[in-house]
Image (spheres, coloured by chain):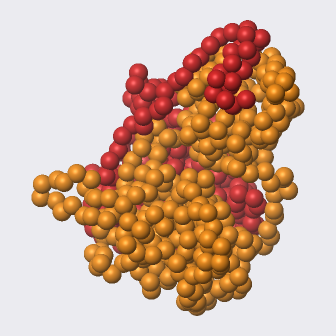
Chain colours: A orange, B red
Amino acid sequence: MNKMNLAEYKGVFVFAQQVDNKISGVALELLGKAKDLAKDLDTDVTAVLVGSDVKGLVDELAEYGADKVIVVDDPELKDYRTEPYTHALAEVINKYKPEIVLVGATAIGRDLGPRVSARVATGLTADCTVLEIGDFPINPIPNQEQKHNQLLMTRPAFGGNTIATIACPDNRPQMATVRAGVMQKIDPIKGAKAVVEEFNPGFTPNNKYVEIMDIVKSVTDTVDIMEAKVLVSGGRGVGSKENFKMLEDLAAVFGGEVCCSRAVTDAGWLPVDRQVGQTGKTVRPSLYFAIGISGAIQHVAGMEESDIIVAINKDEDAPIFDVADYGLVGDLNKIVPALTEALKAEMAAK
Amino acid sequence: MKIVVCVKQVPDTKGGVKFNPDGTLDRGAMLTIMNPDDKAGLEAALRIKDECGAEVTVVTMGLPKAEEVLREAIAMGADKGILVTDRVLGGADTWATSTTLAGAIRNLDYDLIITGRQAIDGDTAQVGPQISEHLDIPVISYAQNIKVEGDSVIVERQYEDRHHVVKAKMPCLVTALAELNEPRYMTPGGIFDAYDAEITVWGRANLVDVDDANLGLKGSPTKIAKASDKVRKGAGEKVTLDPTEAVEYLVGKFKEKHII
């Protein structure tokens, strides 16, 4: 890698993802995290807002912690396309030289992040679960300079079975993506204002500007399983789409939601937005029922931070029992309806 | 037309997951497979080959053992396999890996490059888009459908709540989702061919327009500060009871924890 003048790079930047001119929740969560990091580094937080006709979103970013907003507004940026968005963010980085850039690990961010990191020649750490400022190497090593004020990025690998902390000591910016639901938003500061700067690096279509021929929105009920306090999750063992009714009834007792493992979306029993796990969503409800879920590590990675995990499975060797607080070995078809009735009775008695 | 498919050999985490007594993954006991997203990408390439005729070249970077996935790809119907392997490439992060693969692909004629969206061991989804940037061609990630029409590729690009139908002029890179298709099995004839097929092996010297400073551990901007097997919170209680007792047990626990 070419040597960069690292001292030139200042400030914590957040890619303020918007879709249909609505700020994505993960961007607000990242602003919350960016504020912590900026405090440790004695610097400020800048949101980079990229889109078409998006200036109206600036105040919302300020309320969630942005000290400054750089707005890149151009008709070419109406719907997400890799090239113009990469050009926008890469040119912002080249001009403003941030030391840290955080991007949501969404279907947009996991395309934009790598393309930008390759263009500006820096490292990118995907799907981080912890971001903190510290030293690299963490402990001093003889004959090696220990660098301070580095972004230490911790991420699971191998479906969550190993944890690695990664640094990017010789390149700037230090880039990380973070999945939705991992960081916390701050309570919005009503009336907060940010310094707004408009920047347009020019957008001239070339062969890399792909053509969007159609946009097809999924016509599903838009339940956000990441917001639910109680999740009743089903796997292949539930047996059929119809059997999910049992899980819905159980969820209804708690006012919770139904979600699932990948086997269920693959079978078409539930839509993809209900899927928990490495390729689905990361959830951390207070109570998680894993019903007829074997517990492949890809699934566990998406739910193991739940406060209490209940597993119901007929296979006593199912790996889900290794992460469950309460494991019931038995027939879910008998246990789940009986549990629902018993819980209803308990609730009614109160 | 010419299609290059990038594949990775990964430990199989599905089904046959083995744990050590301390709860960490027992890698030695696990088999290796062709990464699922990559296999879907290969299948997509083979379907284009079936429909419109194409030469499919499969490229992998890894240890010499990674040759196995190239033979599997040939047994499925790929035409050529190229193994990129060299000691100096070891320890590469996604930047150095994508630099290496781009350096290898510059030797090849291609209209379309297909990679998997992400590998199940690293889960970064970075290498495909980064290769496209190094080669200065368009990328369409998260493909749930791929179609070739004249000199363009038309892809259904998945997002959380929608998909875009996107058209790009080739050459272009597409990253494939495992749900794109059901990959075919190897054919007996294919397995026979694969056994005899000559695998091209490339090392550092074969990489085009690549600086030594951008390869392997040394060329990786990200460095591992600390790695550990995850300390899981550990299993709680596991009981085998008849349904009535099971329900009583759980309701009792919920009361104890003030859940109800």
Residue A74 appears left or right of A317: right
The number of numbered badges drawn on the structure is 0
Q: Give above or below for A252 relative to A316.
A: below
Residue A335 coordinates in the image, percent (x, y):
77, 18
Q: In which quarter of the image is residue B99?
A: bottom left
Q: Which residue is drawn at 51% across and 54% down?
A: A127
Q: Residue at x 77, y 27 (%)?
A: A238
Quadrant position of the N terminus of chain A in the picture: bottom left
Residue B166 appears left or right of B135: right
Residue A153 coordinates in the image, percent (x, y):
41, 56
Residue B12 appears left or right of A20: left
Residue B193 coordinates in the image, percent (x, y):
53, 40
User: Furthest-front residue in view?
Assistant: A350
Q: Give above or below for A330 relative to A269.
A: above
User: In this view of the protein, which residue sits in the foreground, B51 or B255?
Assistant: B255
Question: Is residue A254 visible from the viewing direction of this image?
Answer: yes
Q: Which residue is drawn at 49% across and 27% down?
A: B234
Quadrant position of the C terminus of chain A in the picture: top right
User: In this view of the protein, which residue sits in the foreground, B31 or B162?
Assistant: B162
Q: Give above or below for A348 relative to B149.
A: above
Residue A69 coordinates in the image, percent (x, y):
56, 81
User: In this view of the protein, which residue sits in the foreground, B197 or A70?
Assistant: A70
Q: Quadrant of residue A59?
A: bottom right
Question: Is residue B189 visible from the viewing direction of this image?
Answer: no
Q: Give above or below for B51 relative to A122.
A: above
Q: Residue at x 65, y 73 (%)?
A: A190
Residue A306 appears left or right of A340: left
